[in-house]
Image: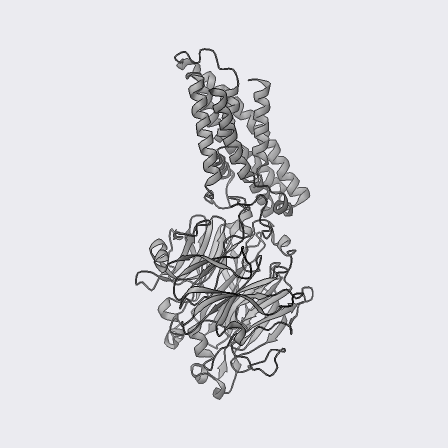
Amino acid sequence: MTRWTPDPTFYASPRDAVQAPPEKLAYVAAFDRTAQRPDAIAVVDVDPDSTGYGTVVGWTDLPYTGDELHHFGWNACSSALCPTAPHPHVERRYLIVPGLRSSRIYVLDTRPDPARPEVVKVLDPKELADGAGYSRPHTVHCGPDGIYLSALGGAHGDDGPGGIAVLDHDTFEVRGGWEADRGPQFLAYDFWWHLTEDVLVSSEWGTPSMIEDGIVGELLLGRRYGHALHFWDLRRRRHVQTVDLGDQYQMPLELRPAHDPTKAYGFVGVVISVEDLSASIWVWHRDGERWAATRVIDIPAEPADPELLPELLKPFGAVPPLVTDIDLSVDDRFLYVSCWGTGELLQYDVSDPFHPVRTGSVRLGGIVGRVAHPARPDLPLAGGPQMVEVSRDGRRVYLTNSLYGAWDDQFYPDGVGAWQAKLDVDPEAGGITVDQRFFPHGDDFRGLRVHQTRLQGGDASSDSYCFR
Amino acid sequence: MTWAQLAGLVALGAFHGLNPAMGWLFAVARGLQEGSRAVLLRSLPAIAAGHGASVAVLASLVTATRSMLASTVLAVSTGALLVAFGLWRMLARRHFRWVGMRLSLAQLAGWSFLVSSAHGAGLMLLPVLLAGPAPAGAGHGGHLAAAPAGALSGLVAAGVHTVAMFAVAAGCALLVHEVLGTGVLRRAWLNLDRLWAGVLVATGLVTLVTAT
């Protein structure tokens, strides 16, 4: 049923959204690498005034096993206020939760009990395959006319192309594949858009056969993983332009467009350069009528004793930063960069997107560093800052430590564990510090690994805005 | 046309103009996007033109038909149509297909035409059009020659309605753009779609009752 007034978590502009009240709950995707037990959505108390602060207060087991929960998103968000087809009286209520390995899609209702979401619908892998021709669903974004869902793989035995499926806003049924003309695009991963420009951007990882049994050395050194961005006409659903970053820049993953609808630029992180193991951040921008991408941050690999390195890295004698997630604050001022290999979370002031200024750094975990959380200085941490989520007001940053089951096992072969951390941000001067009161870890997550965090009411990577 | 009819047309025009989904919000977005009040002001006539065209098609059709057909038949079918369409608007939750944000003024007018038609803006006017005295000769077997004159009165009605719609839409757009800011939307935007569907059903019922 629709509401009489707009959902209070919808904001017309990013400027308004920054004024949103602090979140009280965080939803965290948790998965069982052995596929013996069901994956789950864990609910973490993030209200500092609550007695349960920093603990897992709710838990929803999914009805199947082997899903590998990864990313997920909301059924509706601030884009419902967009003027071409406004419908702001729907509710931000359902979590759309894809299983990256199983290709199942769950719909969870957070309304009856926000701390214990209920599974209300399960879309079979066959529905995604028959309806859209895709498998391995990944990123979820609430669009003005439907729920957009990227997928890494093809269906019915095809490894690719991956692409985007559209789900119905109300019934959550698969409406079909999104692309009217995909041009040369074959690899898929993340996508987002500049709504007011009618532009969609997508990035490239690899097809299921390239990733599901771990990163493949020959493919990486052969520069066969993705290394390009694709720009699309969002209105006509057509491929417009490929921007190749250069084949040494393997795996451009998360896309973070400016929230300000009058700004047509955004950031993308590249996992690794095969020339020197460095990671990089690029900004995409207009160049006349065309699109271009400019490298604005390089993060070098750190030399290390091969004895301390996993098999995969021993020949190189260095730890690659492995930038696997980035996030942009809602005011477009700070960019957060996860270096999952070196175990570092970096903060940059990107007020001038072409000249980022480093303003903060926190070390936790890391392949060699194993830096402990200040709340448990005796406990060396595996994994590193990976998924990073920023609160709407830009004052809090949440981190989890698992990348992707098969890849965790290669880079952290003695176990990646499970932990979540929270950083406090100085929103004026910049700078980040670890919150010592917040450290759910280990058995708190019941033996499951943790991936994406979504914040109640929305966060920096959940909403798009049509008004300045 | 009676004063009551005029008042009805103006009131419905104001109601349509008030609805952000009918276009003034799009004008505000375009103005903000380009950082220009002129863009906002240029968008409004295109939106009103699309709305007016949508309403005029239906209004002139009905008034032309009315000069040929028995008024009871017309009223009953109009009433039934309104109730059915209103119920469909109330129960179906389809979102109008998204057309993109970067439109020329001509495309914007086309968008407005489609949105107004899909919302049944013209339908809502029918009871008002049928409320006036039937033109001479109506109900007596029909006179094809009376059709053009009938259609003209429909066009006039659509014009009156659209002027009112334009004035209110322009007022809303400027108020939000210049004074209130878009922050007001999330608090003050009542679910007019629900109200809209209710109005359609109610006017349909009234038409049915008065016709029989």
Expressed as whole percent of the image width and height from the top left, the position of residue B31 reads 60, 43
Front-lying residue, A175 or A353: A175
Tell me if A389 is positioned left or right of A251 in this view. Answer: right
Residue at the spot x=31%, y=62% of the render? Answer: A158
Q: Is residue B55 visible?
A: no
Q: Is residue B138 visible?
A: yes
Front-lying residue, A309 or A157: A157
Expressed as whole percent of the image width and height from the top left, the position of residue A95 reads 49, 58
Q: Quadrant of residue A43?
A: bottom right
Residue at the spot x=37%, y=66% of the render? Answer: A207
- Counting every numbered tag in the picture gives 0
What colour scheme was applied to this rendering of the protein? one colour
Spot the residue most to the left. Answer: A157
Q: Quadrant of residue A327?
A: bottom right
Q: In this rendering, is residue A364 above or below A195?
A: below
Expressed as whole percent of the image width and height from the top left, the position of residue A92 reads 54, 53
Tell me if A12 is positioned left or right of A97 in this view. Answer: right
Q: In this rendering, is residue A347 above or below A308?
A: above
Q: In this rendering, is residue A289 above or below A356?
A: above
Expressed as whole percent of the image width and height from the top left, the position of residue A452 reads 51, 66
Q: In this rendering, is residue A201 above or below B186?
A: below
Front-lying residue, B116 or A458: A458
